[in-house]
Every structure is written in structure tokens, then in C-alpha cells.
Image (spheres, grey):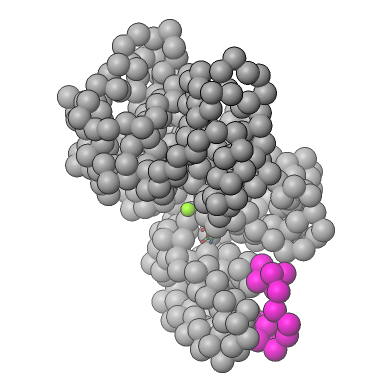
Amino acid sequence: MKVMKFGGTSVGSAQRMKDVCRLITKDGLPNMVVLSAMSGTTNTLVEISDYLYKKNPEGANNVIKQLERKYQQHVEELYATEEYKQKTLDFLKEEFDYLRSFTKILFTSFEEKIILAQGEIISTNMVTNYLKECGVKVILLSALDFMRTDKNAEPDLNYIKEKIGEQLKAHPDYDIYITQGFICRNAYGEVDNLLRGGSDYTACLIGAALMSEEIQIWTDIDGMHNNDPRVVNHTEPVRQLHFEEAAELAYFGAKILHPTCIQPAKFAGVPVRLLNTMDPSAPGTIINNEIQHGKIKAVAAKDHITSIQIQSSRMLLAYGFLRKVFEIFESYKTSIDMVSTSEVGVSVTIDNTSYLKDIIADLMKYGTVTVHEDMCIICVVGDLNWENVGFESLAAQALKEIPVQMISYGGSSHNISFLVKEADKKRALQAFSDTLFNA
Ligand code: ASP
Ligand code: MG
């Protein structure tokens, strides 16, 4: 069974929902379909929650009303029959009354998570009703019945596997199974979510749990590009990526994919295909276990990076110095992206600066600390196995006119990262495209 996931813009209007329904029924095979909320809805639900946190029920009610009108309009456009229009309007009435009920009670993060879950609950119900109206044998499986995170807020894959297996066994012989992306229950059974953009993660977890033949992530761009099309001229879709390459690109800035979603697919060995709803016959990008030898595939950039350099003569020939430095970051729950060391110093980068002041104060016990803000990590991804010759110099050559503060290479066989000023990002990305891809 294939898993097909459609993001917010792919279900962003009645017409787009109809397009999705055509795509999921085209192969005539049973498919598992994961849907996001209609685009903009989750942001609106966050806005409603913000009003409620601020004890402004009137503000919340206004936004709820506007959102309700929008959905009523979608119903008019989506369904052909009065029966399904009415059925869906009744469902929406219940949903929006439920949202309004939160304006009358104490509001905490538990309530917020329930509110945020409604976007996916609404979109999946609407699409399921549409497919029913079209005569498709479809069933909506609630993600809240099988998606669960553990006490560390990590997906509980064994539980997911068992429960989704039970669901499919209890409901055989359907052509389409629809479920919600993003939403889940936590270890305490409360409604929770996999963080913003988490529907990709849902799809990959389900694909891994079912040992699916393929996980398809449908968006509105033709696969992963070899550079950022918003910044650089002449980018092209990359047709194939190794799981590790895709994970690096997603983490370092390729917005098309949720950064951690690749892991479950990789462990299960299930290929992930990125496809375009606007151009369904385009090949997109396949992510699997294959390495294209000696090939640099793509470049991605991550902004708003802060670098921290710690220099100390005490590091010279000392052991335990790095551990002490890393422990400081750990104690402030701040993760490090890049690391570079010399005999007398270590440089690291972070993107979460919430505890920067405290971190610096602690680091100063061990040496001189220098901080640079507004930096940018540029990550070059491909078959960068150290035994291949020439690729490090080729990548460095591209940046011959741009000041580089740090280089990190050898951490994996798939990337080299360069730290440059954010102000040089565009120039650096263009230089990489010109040297590596368009030469
Ligand atoms: N609807 C959620 C969000 O906007 C999840 C997703 O779209 O992947 O973050
Ligand atoms: Mg997304």
C-alpha cells in the first residue's frame, strides 16, 4: 500500500481537493492518504489560541467566525449534491461550535493542542465526504487512534505499527484510507502534535509502520531543487537523493521536507518520492538508499546562525576540554550544528540563541569567547566520501571570493558545510550553482 501525503496548499481550495481526489484514485489500488489542514488554517488556529491565552474571547470569536464562513464557502464549491453539502455543513457547525466552546473555559496548552488539531480533522472529513459523494469506497481513520508519541515526545513506532495494523484489519476492503497528518496523542493520551509542518513526519511514520512500497509527499514544487530557487538563478530539480543527503538538505534549509521525517523511512528502507500536484506527471525526486558515485547533488543554506569561538591555552594537550564545552550547551538544551577544532580552540554554531548570554558566561570560565551573529551555514550535499578526490577543493574553489569563517567536513560522507556571513549568502549560493551545477 502506498502512502500519499498532501500538504496545505494541495488541499487549499475546493478545486485542489478535487484534484487530490483524482490523484489518489487514479491507480485503482488501495492507498493510505495523509492530509494537512487547508493552507492558512493552522496559522489561524494559532491566532485563535493567542487570543484565548490573552483572555480575549471576543477576538477569538471574530476569527472563528471568519474561518467558519470560509469553510462554508468551500462546501458550496466542493459538493454537487444537497445531501453532502448538508452533511458537511452539519459537521462544520459542530466543529466551529466546539472551537467556540473554548472561549468559555480556562485556556492552557492542552486546550491549544486540541484547537490546533481541528484543521486536519476538518480537511480529512471534507475530502472523505467528497470521495463518498463520488462513490469511492473510502474510510477515514482517526490519527488519534494510532499516532502516539512517547515520554520523550518521540514517535512510538511500535505502538503506531500495532495500532494501525489493527485499524486496517478491522476495516479491510476499502479503496482509500484517509487520515490526518500532524496530530497525535502523547504518552498520557492527550491530544498533541508532531510540531509545525509535521504532516510529512506522519506520512513517513505510517509508511515505515506499514512497510509501505513508497511514501509520496505531494507539494506544489517539482521535487527538491539543487539550490534555493528563491535566491539563485537556474536551479533544477534533483531526481534522486540518498536518505542522508535528503535529511541534510531538509535540515539545512530546503523547505520542501520536514527535517526529521526522513529517519523512519530510512530505517524501514521505504523510498520517499516528492511529487508536484500542479504537474503530476513530472518525475519529482526519489529519496532512497542509492548513492550516485562521485556526484555533488545540491546546496542548501540555513540562516540566523550564531558562531561561538572559545580559545584557551588550557586546551593545549589537555583532555576533557571539549567535554566541558559541550556540557555547557547541553545544560542549556542548545544543540550545536557545526563544530571545528584546533589545538587551541573550538568553534561551534547554534541557531537557538535563547540562552546565549548564559552560555557565554559559562564558557568564559574556560577561555576567550568570540561571538558572531547573522551567519549562515551553507551545506553542500552529495557523495563526499573522503576517498573521492577533488570534491573538497571544487567546493572550496566556488567560494574563492567569499570570506569563510568555518568549514566542517568529514562528519559524514555526504556533506561539507561552510559558515559565511548571512549578507554573503546569495553570492555564495550563486557561486556554488555556477561552479558545481551550471559550469
Ligand atoms: N497543518 C500543520 C502545519 O501547518 C501541519 C502540516 O501542514 O504539515 O504546521
Ligand atoms: Mg510542509
Front residue of this view, candidates 396 and 104 = 396
Q: Residue at x 49, y 80 (%)?
A: 67
Q: The N terminus is located in which quarter? A: top right
Determine the image quadrant of residue 124: bottom right
Q: Is residue 335 left or right of residue 141?
A: left
Q: In this view, does 333 lie to the left or right of 422?
A: right
Q: Residue at x 36, y 14 (%)?
A: 294
Residue 105 within the magenta-colored segment of the rendering: yes
- The image shows residue 332, relative to residue 186, as above or below, that is above
- Residue 283 locus on image (x, y percent): 35, 37
- Residue 410 locus on image (x, y percent): 48, 19
Q: Which residue lies furthest to the right in this view?
A: 188
Extent of the magenta region: 95-114
Q: Is residue 353 left or right of residue 231?
A: right
- Residue 146 locus on image (x, y percent): 74, 53
Q: The C terminus is located in which quarter? A: top left
Residue 88 within the magenta-colored segment of the rendering: no
